[in-house]
Amino acid sequence: MKRSCLLFAFLPLLALAEDQPALQEITVTGKQEDVTARRDATTQKVIIGRKDIENMGVMTIGEVLGKLPGVEVKGDGHRARGMSRDSVQILVDGERPAGGSRIVAGVVGRLPAGELERVEILRGSSAEYGGAASVTVNLVMKKPVSKRSTTVKVAAGMNGDEPTGQFTWTENGGEGGFAWTLPITLNMHRRPAGSMLERRNETTGVTVLNEHDKEQGLFTFREFVMSPRMTWKQERDSLTVAPLLFDGLGKRNSDMTQTAASPASSSTFIANGDRSSREEMRRRLQRLRVEGEKHLADNKLTGRISLNHGTRDVHVLRLSHDAIGTPSSNTDDTSSNEHESSMAFRLDRPLGEQHLLAVGLEHASLNSSDTQTFSGVTSHYANSERQNILWLQDDWMLSDKTTFTYGLRGERVDLDTGSSAQQHGQVMPSLAIRYAPQEQWLLRSSLGAGLKMPRLNEISDAATLSVAANTPTEADTRGNPNLRPERSVNFEAVLERYLPDNAGVFGLNFYARNTQDFTERRVQLEGTRWVDRPQNEGSARHWGWELDGKVRTDVWGWKGATVKAHLTLPHATVNDARLGISRMARDTPKYIFSAGLDENLPKLKSSYGVSLQLSGRSVTDIPGEEYAVSDARATLDGYWLYKLSPVFNLRTTARNLLATDTVQNTRFTNGSDVYSLNSRSVGYRSLLVTLEGRW
């Protein structure tokens, strides 16, 4: 198979023409049409433009990430191609936070969606972005323009039965080569949460525990964000200064009631206690980013420096009563401090008429300290991470139809949690080709290596103890000081068909990824405690197909409409070194599908859109240990935009119209003991009405 992949990757080299025109640098701008930008890019890139972002009808950048084609929201993170662990690399204007810094990444997700100029989705390995993640998402923020203008958005609506709202005011201005923008945002959200758990334990086939939990909760938060940006331009050179101030206060209250079968094997349930949780979280971030661009003859030098300081304070109070009403309580206080700095420099230099050479140097440093007090016992943790990256890449235009991109990327990462430390590095080559045999056909292929380091919390032995009884379904959570990095080889082959007059594009992509020291989380008994840790399980192979398309239907007689869709069919197998078997990777869905329709209705001064997201059923099957099933999910959203005047629009957005729940059933086996947990998280509909003004 490896020989076939290599042959397919470089087959277009056989079709080189004799003429070799000069290579032109491709720059994607906010004004460039998305289909054209995708075609012109030397790498495999999908552009989500400002109009598409507005049509999502979401309030925050985090919600935008959850609606990207081929990207799923899973727990607190995002995943693609069915890979659960860090399969999506998120950059902000090309910047990657060290260790996926939780405060920086979390704050960026809370920024208003209107701050985005576009989203770039990149697939395949490259020297510039590496190959650790299967998909890279680059969030490109809006740049200031010198034209004086004001933008206002006032949103109000309901999440379930709870009110929510957002207010954003943006002033833009400047003169000559100076431009500035001042966005101020206030989020005030209330979001309900509900779940049901069924817990059953058996020993030698006899039920010894049968409990049902029902939990209702409410999450409220208010957030203030101010993110001015100032740009000075002189001819082609520029300097941008972008500070950011974030202050957020969140509260999460939940009440759980429990019933239990008595006796455990019967169908008669009686009250078995209750538990209340009161959590308050305060998060602050100050950030300063400076970036510049300098042209020297035909050379372009770009650089950026970013400084971040964030704090996060969490207080949790838990009150509970057992079956006879005996009260108990505990508190959990956590205080986190993070200091992060990063810098990057890049030189683009044409060599002759056919080569565009790029050299990049990146450094990132993260220092964090955590203090946790649990029921009067205080623990302190200090963590640090250093990243150093040097990469070199050349775009070589072999002919007017063929561009060959090759590069080399060196990474060194140092991790230190106080109790454990790791240092790893690797030099990784990458190759890619772009071949256009005909005007409307395009073939792309890439081959490269990747290094995925553990996160700091994955190698820390600090424990998060289970709140209730310690079982496989409610295990302690710890890191693994001996966790090794994943090393992968990645292959992509893409065929794209572009319609005449930029009416749209269809794409078919095959991907394959071979990973050594593949990491999954595993629950196992350690002494007398059940513990959930990340483990290196062996080698893994991920492969699959992706189909996508976007069509503007004017050429077919349907005026003003756009139809788009994306389908991923993932496959994954693990050669489990511990068990000595080949099995399916955990939690791999059968498919991931998204589709949308947008249409303009000029006679009604309106536009509307609907979008559908489907995630297929996923199964985890570890013989003799664990069997879990996550049900398929369908999410349906829609919006209607009415143009009130040349200045004001009224947008109505409805999300999760099907009120889809999240359902998962898990069963652990340990000898003659069986532990089962069936969970259902309630899905709530939401409705949001937004008044948009621009003058």
Image: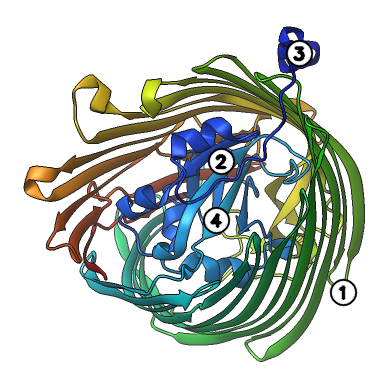
Mark linked to residue 139: 4
Specify the quadrant that holds the C terminus.
bottom left
Q: CA distance from mark 1 to mark 2?
A: 33 Å
Q: Relative to 103, does residue 634 appear above or below in the rendering?
A: above
Q: Earlier in the sequence, mark 4 or mark 3?
A: 3
Instruction: State the residue position of label 2.
Output: 80
Q: Nearer the viewer, residue 318 or 209?
A: 318
For residue 125, above or below residue 300: above
Q: Label 1's element?
A: loop
Q: Quarter of the image for the N terminus: give it.
A: top right
- Label 2 is placed on what type of residue? Ala
Q: Label 2: state its secondary structure.
A: strand
Q: Pointer 4 and pointer 3: residues touching (CB < 8 Å)? A: no
Of mark 1 and mark 4, the one earlier in the sequence is 4
Asked whether disc 2 touches disc 3, contact meaning CB atoms under 8 Å apart, the reply is: no
Which residue is disc 1 drawn over? 418
Q: Earlier in the sequence, mark 2 or mark 3?
A: 3
- Report the residue at 75% width, 26% height from top: 581
- Look at the numbered disc 3 and give the secondary structure of its residue: helix
Residue at screen point 27% across, 58% down: 684
